[in-house]
Image (cartoon, coloured by chain):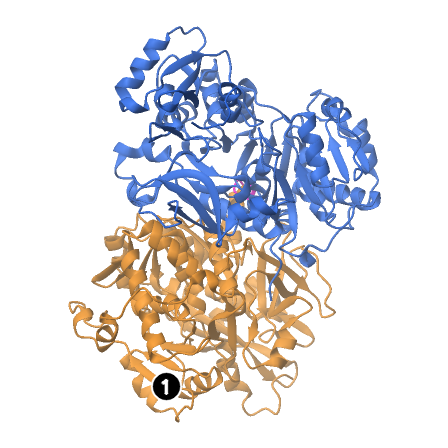
Chain colours: A orange, B blue
Amino acid sequence: MNAPLTHLRFLLRAEQQFGSKIAVIDDVQEWTYAEYGIRCRKLATLLEKMGLSSGGRVAYLAYNSHHLLEAYYGVCLAGGVLVPLNTRLSADNIHFILQDCEAEYIFIDPEFLPLLEKCPPLASLREIIPVESSSRSPLQTSNQTDPYELMIKDLPESANLDVYKVRENAVAEIFYTSGTTRHPKGVMLTHRNLYLHGLETALAYGTTDSEVQLHVIPLFHVNGWGTPQYVTCAGGTHVMLRQFDPQLIFSLIEKHQITGMSLVPTMATRLLNSPGTNSYDFSSMRYVNIGGAPSTPSLVRKITELLGCECSAGYGLTETSPVLTVARLKSHLKSDTSKKYELLAKAGYPIPGVDLQIINAEGQSLPWDGNSVGEIVVRGDTVAAGYLNAPQENDLNFRNDWFHTGDLATIDSDGYVQIVDRKKDIIISGGENISTIEIEKVILNHSDVLECAVVAVPDNHWGEVPKALVVLQPESSTDEESILKHCRTHLSGFKCPKSVEFRLDLPKGGTGKILKRLLREEFWKDENRRVH
Amino acid sequence: MNAPLTHLRFLLRAEQQFGSKIAVIDDVQEWTYAEYGIRCRKLATLLEKMGLSSGGRVAYLAYNSHHLLEAYYGVCLAGGVLVPLNTRLSADNIHFILQDCEAEYIFIDPEFLPLLEKCPPLASLREIIPVESSSRSPLQTSNQTDPYELMIKDLPESANLDVYKVRENAVAEIFYTSGTTRHPKGVMLTHRNLYLHGLETALAYGTTDSEVQLHVIPLFHVNGWGTPQYVTCAGGTHVMLRQFDPQLIFSLIEKHQITGMSLVPTMATRLLNSPGTNSYDFSSMRYVNIGGAPSTPSLVRKITELLGCECSAGYGLTETSPVLTVARLKSHLKSDTSKKYELLAKAGYPIPGVDLQIINAEGQSLPWDGNSVGEIVVRGDTVAAGYLNAPQENDLNFRNDWFHTGDLATIDSDGYVQIVDRKKDIIISGGENISTIEIEKVILNHSDVLECAVVAVPDNHWGEVPKALVVLQPESSTDEESILKHCRTHLSGFKCPKSVEFRLDLPKGGTGKILKRLLREEFWKDENRRVH
C-alpha cells in the first residue's frame, strides 16, 4: 500500500505535528507551520486561479525570502514545477531558461524587473508577478501594502492537489546549471528525488526538530542544498537571509539561536576575515557544512574555532539533488585525532541512499587506495530524471545506470572521497595530470592569500601550464616569487604554477563559487583550440 | 534515474563504508561488516544451489543469533522471502504457517526440531536445515563443527542477485501475527517497506554509526522492530541476545558499551526488579525504546533512572513494518518538565513517512483534543502490501487508502497519540466504554503489583464487567480489597474492576506481551456468544 514519495508530505507532517511552532523567520516577520502551510496553499490557489497547466513551469527570481520558501511547496501543491533562477544570471541566460522550460509564470523581486525587460517576448509566459521582499524595509509589515499580499489575501487555503495522489516520478523542480560558456541545462528533480533526499540528508546531518537553520546558501542553488525539504521534514525552523552579509549572519546567529548553516568556502573565508566576532554569542551553533567547492583542513579548523561547533565539508551536484557525501567523522575514526581536520575537509563519504564509485576511462571501477584517480559515478535515490530538452547530454551523462559527474577523485581506504579536479579543469602539462584544486589548496595556505584560482594557460613547450590568479588578504602585500616559493616548498616541481597574477577580485557565481572557466577563457580566446 | 528501494542496499553501503568495523557480536564471536556481508552472500549462494525458487519462502525458527540476522539479508539476496517464526508457536500454528506460505526451506535451531516433527508432512518443504546456535556453549567456536558452517564454508560469496535489479514492490519478508484464537495471518512487507522503514526509524531515533544495539526484542517480532535494517543502514553494531535474561543484559551493556535497546513493558519491569544493578556500568546507554504494549509514566521514569539514559514509549504493528510513532519529546515541549514522563509514556507522534488519524465508526476524522476516542488509521511508506491468502481480511483492514489498525486512541493537541484499547479488548459495560488499558495502568501503580491484565467477564446485569488478573511482586502480599480500594481512588466508579484474581503468572507471547484474548477466553467458554 504505497504512498507516493513527495516532499509535499513533509509540509503536511510539519503542519500536523508542528503547527504551532515557528516555521519561518524573515527579518521582523515570522510564521508558524500552520501559517506557513496556509501561505503555501494560497499561492497554490492563486496559480490554479490564474490557470497554471498541470506540470506547468513557474519561475522564481528572488533573493532568499519567505516568499521563495513558500514557492517550494506552493507551486508543487498547484501541480506545477518550480524553476528557481540564479540572481546573477544575464538577461540572455534568463531568456534562454524561460524559453527552454516554457515558463508560464514568473515571480520576481522588483529589483530584477529591468533584467526581465531586456528579454525578448516569450510565447509561453502568461504573467509576471512582482513580489516585494519583506526584508527590504525592516519595519514595514509587507502584508499590508505589497500587491502580491493583496492578491493572495482573500484566497481560500483549502483547495489544491491531493498530496497522496501525486505521481512520485513527476518532475517537481528544475534547476539550471550555471553554464558559463554554453547554454544552461535544466536539471529535472522529481517528487521522489526531493522526498528521499530530504530523508537521507536529515539522517546524514542528524537533523531534528530543534534545528534552527540559517539559509545562507541561495535557495536557487539546488534548493539551498535541500534545506526547504529536510528542515521541514524534521519540523525545524527556517531563518531567511536575503544576501550574504557577515555582520548580519553573526547577529542572526545570536538573535535566533541558529543551530546550523551551510557555506561555500569563499563565504567561510569572508566570515573568518570579518571583524567583531568576539562580541557575538555563537553558543547555539551545532554545525556548519561547507560545500559547493573543495575545502581545506585549515578552513574547517578555523570555522570550528570561530563558531565553536562542528564543521565539515561535503560534496554534491545539481544533478543529485544535490548532497552526495558529507565529511563527518565515522565513529570508529574519532580516536585518531591527528587526521581529524584532514578528513573533515575532504568531500566525505556517501550519505544513505547514494552509491558512489570512481571509474577509469574504460569504465572500470578503481580501488579505494587514496591514490587511484577516476571519474566519480553515482547511482541512488537522488539522481535526477535527466536534463530538460537535452537528449545528447542525457545519453552522455546518465548512462549504464550511473550518473557520470565529470569530477575526478580519489577514495581512501576509509571510504572518504577527495575531489581532485573537474574533468574539464584538470591541466595536462607535458603529459602529466595536474590538479588545479591541489595547487589552490597549497596557495590558500599562504598567510597573505584570501582567494585563489588556478587555471591552464597555453604554453608552446608544455602544451598548457598552471597559472595562479590570486586575491590578497586586506592590507597584505606579497609578490609573485613569495607565492611561487611557497608552492615549490609544498608541491612537486611539475605541479608548480609557472606564473602568478594578482587580482582585486575573482568572478563568482550566485553562490560565491569562483567561475574558473570564465578565468580560463581569458587566456585561450586567441587560440584555435582550448587544449594544447 | 530511480534506484530500487530495497534494504539490501543498506548491506552494500555498510560493507563499503564500514567494512572493517564490527557489525555483529554474538556471545564470544564477532564479525566485521565485510565478514557479515560474506556470510550473508554465502547463505544466498547456498539457497540458490539448493534450488530456491524466485520469491520462494524461507522459514527461520530460532532465537536471536547472528545466523538469523544473516538471514535477513541472505534470504533476500537469493531472491527469496524470509518468514521468521515465533519461537513460542504451537506445532499446529507452525504447521499452518509453513503450509500457508508454502515454505520451501526451514532453518531451525535444533531445540525446535521436536516441534517440527509433530507437524504432518508439508508438500512444499524441500529441506530442513538445522542451525546450531553459537551461543549454546560459549567457548565453542561453532565455525569448526556446526553442520551449517560446513555447508557454507566453501561456497563462493560473489554470486547472488544484482541488488539494483530488485523490484522494490516485491515481498521481502512475511511475519505472522500471533492469532491466539484464529489462524495466524501472514503480513507481507516489501523491499520498499523495509528500506523506507529503515531510513525513517533511523531518522526518528537519531541512529548513527556510533550505535551499539542490543537485540533484546526477538527478531521474529516484526524484524525486531526494524533493527536489522536501521542499525545496518547507519553502520552501527548489532549485539545478539539469545533470550531475555536481566543479568546477561546488564553485563552485555557494560561489556560492549551498548548505546540502545528496545523492550516490551514486561521486560522493562523485570529489569527493574532484578538485583545487583549497582554493580554494572551503564554509562554507554543513550536510549531505551519501550513498545509492544502500552507503557506508564512511572515505568519510563524508573528505566530512565536505572540506566541513566533517555527512555520513551512508542507504538507500531506488524502491518506497519512496525514503527508508527515514538514518544520522544518535541523540542518546543521540553521546557515544560511537569508533563515530561506523561508524554514519554504515550504512544507518541508519527515518525516521518507516517500519516496517522483517528476516525469514528462513520469513517470521519476526529479532533486532536485529547478526549475524542477513535480507531487509528494510517497511511504512508511502511504500510504492508497486505495479508497473504486473506482477501477478506485485506478488504476489511486495507481500505480507502488507509490501514485500519483496530486500535482505539486519543490524540492530544500536541499530536501525541494515547492508546485507549484494542477495539476487541474494550469493555462495554451497561452502555459505557471502559478501557482495559486505563485500569491496568492504575493497578500497575499499586506498589505490590508486578503484572496485571484486565479483561471483560460476563455479567448478567451489566452484560460484561472488568476483572483484574494480578501477579504480585516477589514477597509481596496484598488482598483483593486493597487493589479495589486503590482502583476506586484513581478511577471513576463505573470503570473499577468488579473482582480481582491473583495468579502466579500470565500467559505471554514470544515478546513477553500478555495474551489477553487467551485470558478472556477462560471466562467466556461456557457462553453462547463473546459479548453480552
**Residue A102, image x, y percentages:** 46, 84
**Residue B245, image x, y percentages:** 56, 20
> Would residue B274 appear left or right of A142 to someone viewing this image?
right
> Would residue B82 appear left or right of A444 to someone viewing this image?
right
Q: Which residue in the protein does label 1 denote?
A: A126
Residue appearing at x 52%, y 64% in the figure: A168
Q: Residues within 10 Å of mark 1 (few under 14, many from 20)?
A: some
User: Is A126 or A61 nearer to us in this picture?
Assistant: A126
In the picture, which quadrant includes the C terminus of chain B?
top left
On the image, which quarter does residue B502 sit in? top left
User: Is B167 or A469 nearer to us in this picture?
Assistant: B167
The verdict on residue A267 being magenta is no
Looking at the picture, does residue B460 appear above or below residue B102?
A: above
Residue appearing at x 43%, y 62% in the figure: A163
**Residue A448, image x, y percentages:** 40, 66
Residue appearing at x 33%, y 66% in the figure: A41
In the picture, which quadrant includes the N terminus of chain B?
bottom right
Residue A212 visible in the current orientation: no
Q: What range is drawn magenta here?
A: A332-336
Magenta stretch: dominant secondary structure = loop
User: Is B388 or A127 nearer to us in this picture?
Assistant: B388
Residue appearing at x 44%, y 30% in the figure: B425
> Would residue A395 appear left or right of B471 to someone viewing this image?
right
Amino acid identity at mark 1: Arg
Residue A458 visible in the current orientation: yes
**Residue B200, image x, y percentages:** 49, 48
